[in-house]
Amino acid sequence: MRSMMAVAAILAVLALPAQAQMGGGGGRRHQGNDSRSEPKKPQVDEKAYKAALDRIPEPTGKYDPWGMTRPASPDKK
């Protein structure tokens, strides 16, 4: 009987965080107006975007992402 009560108590304790996340438990609920706190989206400046793309340097050689992990290739004779 005690072990069943202990299991029930453990399950009740484990269920509390899930209940808090789901909004249950009779806590204070949000009743504010959601439209007043909408974040403003930044305006995209096309000229600045294209200027930033132009400042990216062109690659000088071929990029090898596995270059450091491969063993050095033997010299071809």
Image (cartoon, rainbow, N blue to C red):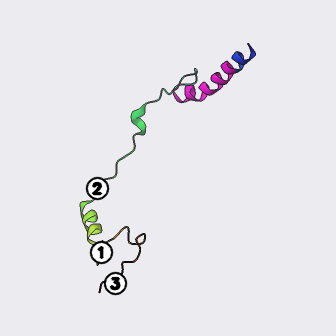
Residue 69, quarter of picture: bottom left
| Residue situated in front as seen by the camera: 24 or 77 | 77
Secondary structure type for disc 2:
loop
Q: Could you tell me how far apart the alpha carbons at marks 2 and 1 are, in whole angstroms?
A: 23 Å
Give the amino acid at mark 3: Asp
Secondary structure type for disc 1:
loop
Does label 3 or label 2 sit earlier along the sequence? 2
Crowdedness of circle 3 by 10 Å Cα count: few (<14), some, many (20+)? few
Q: Could you tell me how far apart the alpha carbons at marks 3 and 2 are, in whole angstroms?
A: 51 Å
* Residue 42, percent from left and from top: 34, 52
| Residue situated in front as seen by the camera: 26 or 42 | 26
What residue is pinned by disc 1?
Answer: 57
Say whether residue 12 is left or right of residue 38. Answer: right
Q: Residue furthest front?
A: 77
Give the amino acid at mark 2: Val
Magenta stretch: give its range. 7-23
Q: Could you tell me how far apart the alpha carbons at marks 1 and 3 are, in whole angstroms?
A: 32 Å
User: Would you say residue 20 sits in the magenta stretch?
Assistant: yes
What residue is pinned by disc 2?
Answer: 44
| Residue situated in front as seen by the camera: 60 or 48 | 60
Crowdedness of circle 1 by 10 Å Cα count: few (<14), some, many (20+)? few
What residue is pinned by disc 3?
Answer: 75
